[in-house]
Image: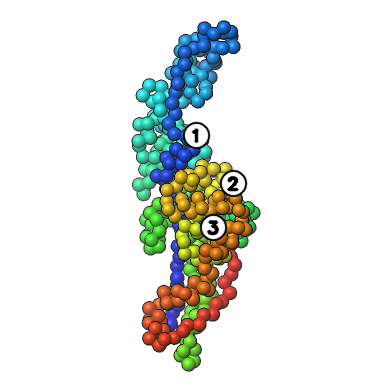
Amino acid sequence: MNFQRMRTVSCFVMIAGLICGVWGHLGLGAQEVSEKPSAVSEVSPKTQIPYCSVCGKRCTGRYSVLRNANFCSAECIGKKFSCASCGVTLGVGENAAFSTLKDIQEKELLFCGTCMEKPGCTFCGSRKETALLPDKRTACATCRSLAVFKTEDARPILESVQKMLAERFGFPVNPSIPLKVLPYEEFHQHRKDHSSRSDALALHLTEISGHTWLSDDGKTLYVEMNSLDSGMLVLEGAPGPLVFDAIAHELTHEFLRRKFYHFADAKIEEGFCESIAAACSIFNGHPTLALRRIGNPDPVYGDGFRLIYPMLQDQGWEAVMEFLGKNSQPMKEYVREHIHEMLDSETAEFIRKNKLRPKLKFGKIPKH
Ligand SMILES: [Zn+2]
Ligand SMILES: [Zn+2]
Ligand SMILES: [Zn+2]
Ligand SMILES: [Zn+2]
């Protein structure tokens, strides 16, 4: 009799569509320019006449104020406020309203309305020098320059995430956790096999395995569990900071699997993983990746983040661990309850027919 391997899968998801929502949340949406008459007629001209923030000249005629800075002319506005994609001057005429966003390097970029209508970078939303990847995703020049395509390029990222998780959160380190960077087709085959989301960037896989045998009197089926293996798959082409964030999310699944095992409510598990990944991205100098999550409309990832992150902030680590403990099922309990699903069909049928009550014996599962 074989013990069928059971797999669980978790995934990291990046939702491009939520980016605009979060920008809205952060109040970084369209900006308006206001024009003011020059204060040239004021009593104390020397102090009252504004200076152009670009060329430094006094604005003796009409001048513009944009984001609290003065500009003598459209030309000077263009030097500070131009579309990062097409170069058009922003803040004047047809482009009075424009959008601000941060690329993956946290650099603030401005875009005109026309460029914002074009497809944005899958990873950061930027419209600057975008190109189609062979798998039809769109990537901007900055994200392409930081893209991770090989497993050996992802390894050092994994190691720095592990170091951070150990230092900041006391996660046990498993230095030999398998990691693979896969091309789109292969990655999405795995994704489909585990019915994970179409926008997943990384997957965490867990396998528990063991074997079964019958007692001499044929009345008891022993099930021995002896290993819990896990591994990570990363989709190629994402920029380093996002891979860092995705790996932090997946390693948090690893932590949860070994400490608590099973969560019936995916929102709690994903919410905790999203919260730890967000914190790691902040420590890693990429707060934008954390802020995106605030407005994520997803009922599992978004709601989960909004449930767990404030809990970590307000109630602290121990309270969250207690909450996770109450909302999870340890491996032994879970396996006992789901033993029929975990056995191969022949064994399951044999048990049913003979009304056997399987006894479970658990081997020692390593802590990491
Ligand atoms: Zn996940
Ligand atoms: Zn000027
Ligand atoms: Zn433009
Ligand atoms: Zn990008």
**Residue 283 tag number:** 2
Badge 3 marks a residue whose secondary structure is: helix
Q: What residue type is labelled 3?
A: Thr
- Distance between the Cα atoms at labels 2 and 1? 19 Å
According to the picture, the residue beneath numbered tag 1 turns out to be: 108
The answer to whether the residue bearing label 3 lies less than 8 angstroms from the nearest atom of ligand 1 is yes
Percent across and percent down for residue 294 are 49, 45
Percent across and percent down for residue 282 are 57, 45
Badge 2 marks a residue whose secondary structure is: helix
Percent across and percent down for residue 3 are 45, 77
- Distance between the Cα atoms at labels 1 and 3? 30 Å
Is any part of residue 160 visible from this angle?
Answer: no
According to the picture, the residue beneath numbered tag 3 turns out to be: 252
- Distance between the Cα atoms at labels 2 and 3? 16 Å
Dot placed on the residue nearer the N-terminal end, 2 or 3: 3
**Residue displayed at 39% across by 40% down:** 120
Q: In which quarter of the image is the C terminus?
A: bottom right
Question: Mark 3 and mark 2 in contact (Cβ < 8 Å)?
Answer: no
Q: Which amino acid does label 1 sit on?
A: Glu
Badge 1 marks a residue whose secondary structure is: strand
**Residue 287 tag number:** none
Name the foreground residue: 146 vs 278. 278
The quadrant holding residue 99 is top left
